[in-house]
Image (cartoon, grey):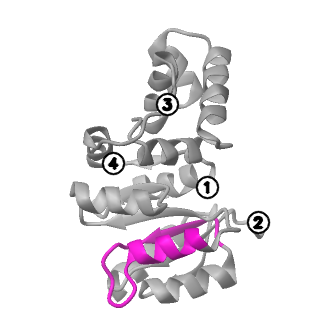
Amino acid sequence: MRSATPRGVRVVVADDHPVVRDGLVAMLGADPDIDVVGSAQDGAEALTVIAAEEPDVVLMDLRMPGTGGVEAIRELRARGGTSTRILVLTTYDTDREILGALESGADGYLLKDARGEELVRAVHDLAAGRPVLVPAALAALTSSRGARAALSARESEVLRLVAEGCTNRAVARRLSIGEATVKTHLAHVYDKLGVGDRASAVRTAWEQSLV
């Protein structure tokens, strides 16, 4: 993966509506720490741009003509060899849409009615390995059923709070434990889930309905 430019996070925007796409490019490009390196009007074009630019984060619409967002996410993950984070940005908040996107390999889920500052923060959070989920996504994942990893009750609590976007310090405060203890619990979670970072742990937890 290419290193970040001096401007910071490299981003690609995929959306079939030109006005929406151009608006997102302009909004994100106004942030001095974001570099929009490409855009696409459908999933197939997005895959081509991603391969060429190797962005840190991709904003992916779900419903696009031809190759849609879920298909593009699934194909990108199947290719492997990329650490690009995928942020689904859509108007749809049904369980079916949310679970389909996350199970395909998306790292975050945000609705298009989010404020500009929320979107910018979400891009930075994903680039830093922090998960991004709207409440509807958390509710969908909580209500779904799946396999269970052998996590302790406290490890599950820590993972749930991390999935909500809490920092280690915030988790420690919520659970009245030390920050070092939070890090230890997360290390155990990573080991049990076979992952190496927060975003991967949350994504695996989504897939296994652990949060």
Task: Kindly identify the amino acid type of the residue bearing the numbered disc 1.
Answer: Ala
Q: Which of the two discs, 1 and 3, sits closer to the camera?
A: 3
Return the residue at label 4.
134
Q: Which SS class for mark 2?
A: loop
Quadrant assignment for the C terminus: top left
Residue placed at 75% from the left, 68% from the top?
1
Q: Judge the density around disc 2: few (<14), some (14-19), many (≥20) Cα neighbours within 10 Å.
A: few
Residue placed at 51% from the left, 46% from the top?
204
Whole-angstrom CA distance, mark 3 to mark 4, is 16 Å
Mark closer to the chain start, 2 or 4: 2
Mark closer to the chain start, 3 or 4: 4
Q: Is residue 45 visible?
A: yes
Return the residue at label 1.
127
Is 57 covered by the magenta stretch? yes
Mark closer to the chain start, 2 or 3: 2
Q: Which SS class for mark 3?
A: helix
In the rendered image, the vertical position of residue 29 relative to residue 160, given as above or below: below
Mark closer to the chain start, 1 or 3: 1
Residue placed at 50% from the left, 19% from the top?
152
Mark closer to the chain start, 1 or 2: 2
Return the residue at label 3.
159
Residue 6's mark? Answer: 2
Is 154 or 37 nearer to us in this picture?
154
Q: Position of residue 114 (x, y in %)?
A: 32, 57
Whole-angstrom CA distance, mark 2 to mark 4, is 30 Å
Whole-angstrom CA distance, mark 2 to mark 3, is 33 Å
